[in-house]
Amino acid sequence: MSETIEILDERRLQILEKGKDDRSIVCERASTAGSVSQRACVFCGSRVVLYPISDALHLIHGPIGCAAYTWDIRGSMSSGQELHRLSFSTDIRENEVIYGGEKKLYAALVELIDRYRPKAAFVYCTCIIGLIGDDVDAVCARVQREKGIQVIPVHSEGFKGTKKDGYRAACESLFQLLAKDEQSSVSPYTINILGEFNLAGETWIIKDYYRRMGIDIATCFTGDARISDIAKAHRAKLNVVQCSGSMTYLAKLMKERYGIPFLRVSYFGIEDMSKALYDVAEFFKNDGILQRTQGLVQSEVTQLLPKLAEYRRDLEGRKAAIYVGGSFKAFSLVKALRHLGMETVVVGSQTGSEEDYNYLKEITNEGTIICDDSNPLELSRFVLEKGADLLIGGVKERPIAYKMGIGFCDHNHERKIALAGFEGMLNFAREVHSTVLSPVWKYSPARMKFARLAQQNEIN
């Protein structure tokens, strides 16, 4: 049946099967026309990075649909102000398309700043603004002079590229907020966390680990972030990059300008979470920090492994498909599933590099399908071909899993369950177990149909 789902010829080089295709995957290219890519646009890429800054104003200069599409787009929690939870738009319509939207943008900024007193403001440029040519930079500069706060244009017109280009636009905007605070004290063991967005409070989990080690956090880009913390981030001694796709560019900018080295890490799964802590401890070359890190990891893992063993007994031999935004997350998920006795049979990402996909080939088994920038039809075919029992993805992948009659685990930015850290690994195991073992799937029309087809094939 899966053979009836065709792969577009233009996409064949972006898909490979380990052990069958002896080549590197083609990636980092614009989505193929007609493939219905699961990627978001440039504007959405910038929005998901900047959105969690909770004491800033986020104003979308464009049609109301862009604001609706990205409203409350992350499960990002705040320990204080929650201005980021509100959605503001200039609501560009036909009149502004013809005569320009600069006056409307100026009026909106002045009204919102006067009412909410934000510490800074971001103005997101959408597709229509790029077409009509509003001078957003000039409007932002004027309001900045008049109101005394930074007003930063985010050049994120959706047609300019891919979601990854939106990440770059967001990093360039964040870079403008740095080096505004030279007075606050910063310890010699201070780091920044990049690419962690406090989904379901995960930033707080990770910060607690580092504090137990004796490490201070200047700021997190951008989970539960404050403008005042970002202002002193240039004085940290190390940048730790969790979501490499979204934040490596900012880390490189900070290394070039301020000389801050950076490490790429992942906070998902046992091995990668442990390595993230050890890498930071080893960077500072402090015996006390290293000893505390060893004690922390030993304590957490000792408590975790017996609990995982209970779930593994039921999940042993099951198969999983993974399709996520960033490839670093995919690495960790492959390893985490292995702890649960599950095999990854399909794995892909929206923004991976050739180096990332080569590493996925190293850590997966023979026969695993690896794909870049996939689409719903392809994912459906791969799930059928490989007999996956579980699909791990985001909100756009959920319908695929349910139509195929298999379990689904949300590992994207809308989720409300913490999956990072050691306690996140336990939450992940619990969620995988509950969805894969749910009795509801045997009543799925798709599963029943596949079972009949399999039975007929055995008889024939």
Image: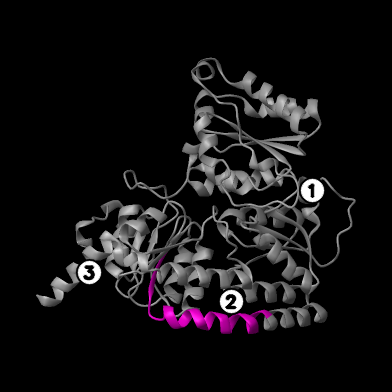
Q: Amino acid at mark 2?
A: Ile
Q: In terms of depth relative to the viewer, which is nearer, 130 or 299?
A: 299
- Neighbor class of circle 2 (other Cα within 10 Å; few <14, some 14-19, many 20+) is many
User: What label sits on residue 231 in the rendered view?
Assistant: 1
Residue 150: percent from the left, percent from the top? Answer: 75, 36
* Residue 444 in sight here: yes
**Is residue 178 a member of the stretch shown in magenta?**
no
Q: Amino acid at mark 1?
A: Ala
Please report the bounds of the magenta region as a residue range: 300-322
Give the residue number, with chain letter if any, for mark 2.
270
**Dot 1 lies on which element?**
loop
Instruction: Judge from the rendering whether residue 308 lies leftward or rightward of residue 194; answer left or right.
Output: left
Q: In terms of depth relative to the viewer, which is nearer, 265 or 353?
A: 265
Query: What is the chief secondary structure element of the magenta stretch?
Result: helix
- The label nearer to you, 3 versus 2, is 3
The disc, 1 or 2, on the residue closer to the chain's N-terminal end is 1
Q: Quadrant of the N terminus?
A: bottom left
User: What label sits on residue 451 in the rendered view?
Assistant: 3
Per the model, the C-alpha gap separating discs 3 and 2 is 35 Å
The disc, 3 or 2, on the residue closer to the chain's N-terminal end is 2
